[in-house]
Amino acid sequence: MKLKSGRDLFHRWEGNPVLALEDMPFRCNTVFNGTPVKLGNEYLLLLRVEGQQGYSFFALARSRDGLHFEVHPEPVLLPAQEGLAAEYERGGIEDPRATFIDGAYYVMYTAVSGTGYRIALARTQDFLSFERIAAISEPGNKDGVLFPEKIGGLYARLDRPFGRGIGSIWLSYSRDLIHWGNAKLLLTPRPGYWDEFRVGASVPPIRTKHGWLEIYHGTKMTSSGPIYRAGSALLDLDDPSKVIARCTVPLLSPRTGYERVGDVGNVVFACGAIVEPDNSVKLYYGAADTCVCVATASLEDIIECTLNNHRPA
């Protein structure tokens, strides 16, 4: 397969960024890494916002077209101030990913404290009020995404435990969303490729007839620091530990000024996507840890790219 002409498979919206500091109704440092959901004809974005104090929290934005957003006047979830959750959220809450399952939206996010990163889980119906459920990983783990349906009667998730300097994507299972086990290594960094330094899950897996489509982020280290790109893999529907295909080329790379320059340069970092009725995919991503952007591609093109640019690695 020859890739279509253009800078990337995903096409950036010409009006990017969809949200920046100037769009926020309260003072903050940056806004980025938003997870999207579509409720009827309305789009919601649960946003990671870094406050002027230096820690992150969540805000909510709404849109009728998925492009023009209005932000709720106040943050919707702040780091816990009491109880057990306060212990592991002292350094903020980051990078939410929302999945609808069992009649509610479950948001996996990163809880930050002096002991490191942990995956935490909250439940919501309206994205204005949240019920914290638990911290659901040991320290040194982040990038948790929940599958939108049970597999073999069990909840399934992807995550990224970090050990010996290596960040890989793992798959694990749970009966109750709190206790997780049967972990299996799924995707590792690939020497010589665009994701040779570190990989992590980005988008909650999308069911397709070809398998679970996972759009993930990968990094390559350079003399001036890492470059974050977005790529794709297909996992078996019945046994997601089986990788059907993994694209050898990225789907989206930092190329524009708003993706290259910011608090952390050379970053495109997705936390979710919307598959529209016409099978176009809206990918929402943080750019340079400074603003929120959207890019689109057809689901068929993403799958074709993944299957036809696959080599074992």
Image: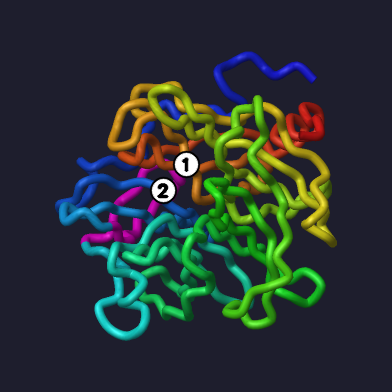
Which region of the structure is painted magenta?
A: 56-73
Q: Earlier in the sequence, mark 2 or mark 1?
A: 2
313 left or right, relative to 75: right
Task: Name the dominant secondary structure of the magenta segment.
Answer: strand
49 left or right, relative to 124: left
* CA–CA distance in space, label 2 to label 1: 7 Å
Classify mark 2: helix, strand or loop: strand
Is residue 192 in the magenta section? no
Q: Residues within 10 Å of mark 1 (few under 14, many from 20)?
A: many
Is residue 71 in the magenta section? yes
The answer to whether residue 143 is seen in the rendering is yes
Query: Which amino acid lies under the numbered mark 2 shown in the image of this protein?
Result: Asn
Mark 2–mark 1 contact, CB under 8 Å? yes
Q: Is residue 38 above or below residue 86?
A: above
Q: Which residue is mark 1?
A: 269
Please state which of residues 278 and 59 is positioned toward the viewer in this rendering: 59
The answer to whether residue 15 is seen in the rendering is no
Quadrant for residue 62, please give it: bottom left
Question: Which labelled disc corresponds to residue 33?
Answer: 2
Looking at the image, which residue is at 31% across and 27% down? 261
Q: Residues within 10 Å of mark 2 (few under 14, many from 20)?
A: many
